[in-house]
Amino acid sequence: MKNLFFVIPAVALALIFAGCSKKNNGPSTTASVMLVNGCNGTTGIYAKVNNVNVGPSNIAYSGNSGYLTMNATTAQAINFYLVSPAGTPLTAGSPTFTTGDHYSVFVGGIVTGPDFVVATDDLTAPSSGNAKVRFINLGSDNLNESFSIGAATLDSNIGYGQYTSYSEIAATSGVGVLVQDPAHPQSAYLAQLISQAFSAGKIYTIMLTGTYTAGSGGSGLKLTVIGNN
């Protein structure tokens, strides 16, 4: 019985300490944040958060970091820099994130006049058989875009630096995506994907970058499809 007497308090003590340890850890206080390079004229960028390097050391033009974990208790100082010339400041912001939520932080516009845009990413699953899509206008022409998939116009009058809510569409192996300002019907102002697949259950952001003045070159208007899940 003496042995039993000493074993019981030891077990109880272990349970007490285990409970305290879990309580001290507390709930997660982080958010998921994707960094996206939509800035025309950059060969690559990288980011520092609160003066600490985070994510890839070279996010190519129209590329992204994937989702990174960031603190959601206070505003986060996010600074973007050019890879070349090395360490050149590009743009910055100090967003506050909500615990458990998802975000995309975009660098948009042109390298000589970049902008910092924060979007909340709604990763709620679409209905069965559907995908979710949204559009963000990061082109540097100050065009008010209409956004269409197939024959359906999903949103319109989307100005520079603005983005739409997510819309559900039927999953497809290939459909046309078109972005154009109705006030400028000329082909030079049009950006499109001839046949883009959208998978059931997936969530996408379609990003416009570049400028119509560059024609069909690397700095011309361009649509990039980003997977959010």
Image (tube, grey):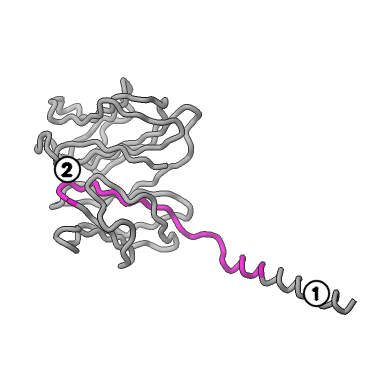
The answer to whether residue 198 is left or right of residue 210 is: right
Question: Which percent across, then down, holds residue 148?
Answer: 29, 27
**214 shown above or below 107:** above
Residue that label 2 marks: 140
Q: Earlier in the sequence, mark 1 or mark 2?
A: 1
What's the amino acid at mark 2?
A: Ser
* Observer-nearest of 215 and 179: 215
Nearer-the-camera pick, 186 or 61: 61
Q: Is residue 100 magenta?
A: no
Instruction: Give the vertical position of 66 relative to 202 (above or below).
Output: below
- Check residue 33 for magenta coloring: yes
Tell me if 127 is positioned left or right of 90 in this view: right
Residue 139, how many percent across, how many down?
20, 41
Which of the two discs, 1 and 2, sits closer to the camera? 1
Which corner quadrant of the image does residue 50 belong to?
bottom left
Quarter holding the C terminus? top left
Please say if the residues under marks 1 and 2 sit with CB atoms less than 8 Å apart.
no
Question: Which contiguous range is marked in magenta?
Answer: 18-43
SS at mark 2 in the image: loop
Q: Which residue is mark 1?
A: 7
**Quadrant of image for the N terminus:** bottom right
* Residue plotted at (16% across, 28% down): 183
Q: Secondary structure at mark 1?
A: helix
Going by the image, does 199 lie left or right of 59?
Answer: right
Horizontal and vertical percent position of residue 3 = 85, 77
At label 1, counting other C-alpha atoms closer than 10 Å, the crowd grade (few under 14, some 14-19, many 20 or more) is few
